[in-house]
Every structure is written in structure tokens, then in C-alpha cells.
Image (cartoon, rainbow, N blue to C red):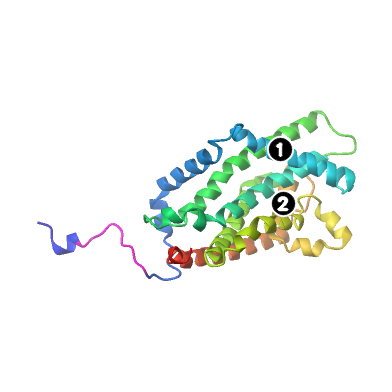
């Protein structure tokens, strides 16, 4: 017969009221199999009923690059710092798409998964983390497209345009991590707010599109400074990340300690606030959503 002490040793104790800073990171590791399952679910469910399936990973950046090249490169005549236009825009689109996907999909995680959250316990942070990880697949495919285009322009160069891979390529995993954490942090803040103010959901996609034009996706930082709004663009933490990404792969852009430090600082602050707000909201969001 088990003693009273042995029978009271539970594997998991779920409490209704815990500290704001009780983030349960250990539970995330214990539920890592669930994270893998959610990643597979996100990938399969999104493309299961599409005709072209994963080919959309290629189609979207290709068509966007064509439109940007025609509108901003040819009609508007915006400089690309001597980089072939297609490479310049594709590099910006690839990095921006990963950040924006992490943000927009995380921003609706409470609304999209209310039924699951209301029925069974698991660390709620698993869900937004699975979104960030599953988006890596799309990012990886689009990165392969960028590399393919780099090989093409290497063997078939464009007159007056040049590019080169630089030492900053060693920081590439760090840049991807920054994009993921910044998108995750902002998404966690927004999803927590939208449980109470649902109108914000309609503004997120539109706001992210506007934010893109405040980042160096369609123009280099040198062009923004030449036009007099470089300081405003510098305040966007994604600017330093995209500039470093372009410098790493194409050899043009601003890669400095100050710009990256600023992006890292903002990312850590946003992520910390996002996790705290998410942790507070997930305790009672079912009552308000």
C-alpha cells in the first residue's frame, strides 16, 4: 500500500493562479513531441487542398520580385546599390516574408486555437513556437530560390551590376533567429490584445504591409538617407537585419555593430514583453474570446 507521501507526488500540477514570471520553460522541453506534431499539422493542413501545394513557396516570391522589379526598379527608377534588381528585391522579400509570416500567424493564435486551448492542458507557448518553426520550411525553400538566382547572375552577369558573398554569411543563423524572435514577440503581444479588442485583427495584415515600406525591402538604406528619411527607417529594427542579410549574401548594405545591436535590443525587449503578456492572458483568455 502506497504511503500518503507517495500518493501525493503528482507528475504535473495545474494551478489557476501563478506568478506573472512563472513562464514554465521546462514544460516546453517536456512537450517537445507536441511541438513537432503541431509543425507537421501546420504544414500539411495549409497545403492539403491546394492544386500546386508547396510550389506556392516559389510562386509567391517570384511574382512579387517581378512586380517590384517592374514598378520600383524600372518605373520608379529606385537604386539597388549596383546589385542586380531581381537579387536585390528577392533578398529583401525572402527575409521580410519570414518575419511577417511569424508575426501575422502568431497574432491570431488565440483566436485560431480557442477550441484546443479550452479543452486540454499543454504549455500554450508551444503553439506560437510551432508557427515560427514551421515557417522555417517556407523560408528555407525561398532561400534556395535566392541561391539559385545568385548562381544564375554569377554565370550570366548583368552589365553595371555586381554582387559577392561576404564574411557576414557566418552570422546568417543569428539573423534568422532575430527575425523569428522579433516576429514572435510582436505576434504574442498582438494576439493577447486581440482577445479583448478583436478589431485589431483586421489591422494586422494591413499594418504589416505598411511596415514593409518603412523597411529597406524595396530600396537600400543609402537611398532612404539620400531622400532625407533614413533616420526614420533606422528606427525599424528589421532594417538592420535586412541590411545585414543583403550584405552577407550580396555584398551591399550596411552591416554594423550599432545597427545589429539596436535590432537585438529591440527584439529582446519585445520578446520579453510578449511572453509576459501572453503568459498573463492565456490564464483567462477563454472567458473573453
Q: CA distance from mark 1 to mark 2?
A: 14 Å
Instruction: Residue at 76% x, 41% y: name it.
Output: 65
Residue 137 vs 198, above or below: the answer is: above
Quadrant showing the N terminus: bottom left
Describe residue 232's horizontal placement relative to residue 96 as left or right.
right
The quarter of the displayed image where residue 170 is located: top right
Magenta segment includes 10:
yes
Q: Which residue is mark 1?
A: 146
Q: Which residue is more in the foreground, 176 or 63? A: 63
Residue 225 position, x and y percent, is 85, 59
Tell me if I can see residue 42 in this picture. Answer: yes
Instruction: Residue at 33% x, 63% y: name it.
Output: 14
Q: Which residue is more in the foreground, 85 or 167? A: 85
Q: Residues within 10 Å of mark 1 (few under 14, many from 20)?
A: many
Secondary structure under the numbered disc 1 in the rendered image:
helix
Magenta stretch, main secondary structure class = loop
Tell me if I can see residue 272 in this picture. Answer: no
Secondary structure under the numbered disc 2 in the rendered image:
helix
Residue 20 position, x and y percent, is 45, 70
Tell me, for residue 242, which label it has, or none: 2
Describe residue 137's horizontal placement relative to residue 249 as left or right.
left
> Which residues are the magenta region?
8-16
Amino acid at each position: 500500500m502506497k504511503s500518503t507521501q507517495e500518493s501525493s507526488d503528482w507528475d504535473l500540477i495545474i494551478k489557476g493562479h501563478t506568478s506573472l514570471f512563472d513562464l514554465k520553460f521546462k514544460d516546453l522541453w517536456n512537450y517537445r513531441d507536441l511541438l513537432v506534431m503541431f509543425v507537421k499539422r501546420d504544414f500539411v493542413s495549409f497545403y492539403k487542398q491546394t492544386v500546386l501545394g508547396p510550389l506556392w513557396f516559389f510562386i509567391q516570391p517570384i511574382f512579387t520580385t517581378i512586380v517590384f522589379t517592374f514598378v520600383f526598379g524600372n518605373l520608379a527608377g529606385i537604386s539597388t546599390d549596383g546589385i542586380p534588381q531581381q537579387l536585390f528585391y528577392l533578398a529583401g522579400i525572402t527575409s521580410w516574408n519570414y518575419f511577417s509570416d511569424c508575426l501575422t500567424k502568431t497574432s491570431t493564435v488565440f483566436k485560431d486555437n480557442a477550441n484546443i486551448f479550452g479543452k486540454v492542458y499543454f504549455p500554450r507557448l508551444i503553439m506560437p513556437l510551432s508557427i515560427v518553426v514551421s515557417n522555417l520550411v517556407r523560408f528555407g525553400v525561398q532561400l534556395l530560390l535566392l541561391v539559385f538566382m545568385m548562381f544564375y547572375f554569377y554565370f550570366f552577369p548583368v552589365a553595371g551590376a555586381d554582387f559577392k558573398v561576404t564574411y557576414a554569411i557566418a552570422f546568417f543563423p543569428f539573423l534568422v533567429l532575430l527575425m523569428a524572435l522579433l516576429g514572435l514577440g510582436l505576434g504574442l503581444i498582438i494576439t493577447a490584445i486581440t482577445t479583448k479588442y478583436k478589431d485589431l485583427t483586421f489591422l494586422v495584415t494591413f499594418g504589416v504591409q505598411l511596415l514593409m515600406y518603412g523597411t529597406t525591402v524595396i530600396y537600400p538604406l543609402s537611398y532612404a538617407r539620400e531622400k532625407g528619411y533614413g533616420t526614420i527607417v533606422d528606427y525599424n529594427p528589421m532594417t538592420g537585419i535586412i541590411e545585414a542579410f543583403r550584405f552577407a549574401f550580396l555584398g551591399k548594405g550596411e552591416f554594423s555593430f550599432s545597427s545589429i545591436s539596436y535590432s537585438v535590443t529591440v527584439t529582446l525587449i519585445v520578446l520579453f514583453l510578449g511572453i509576459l503578456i501572453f503568459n498573463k492572458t492565456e490564464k483567462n483568455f477563454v472567458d473573453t474570446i
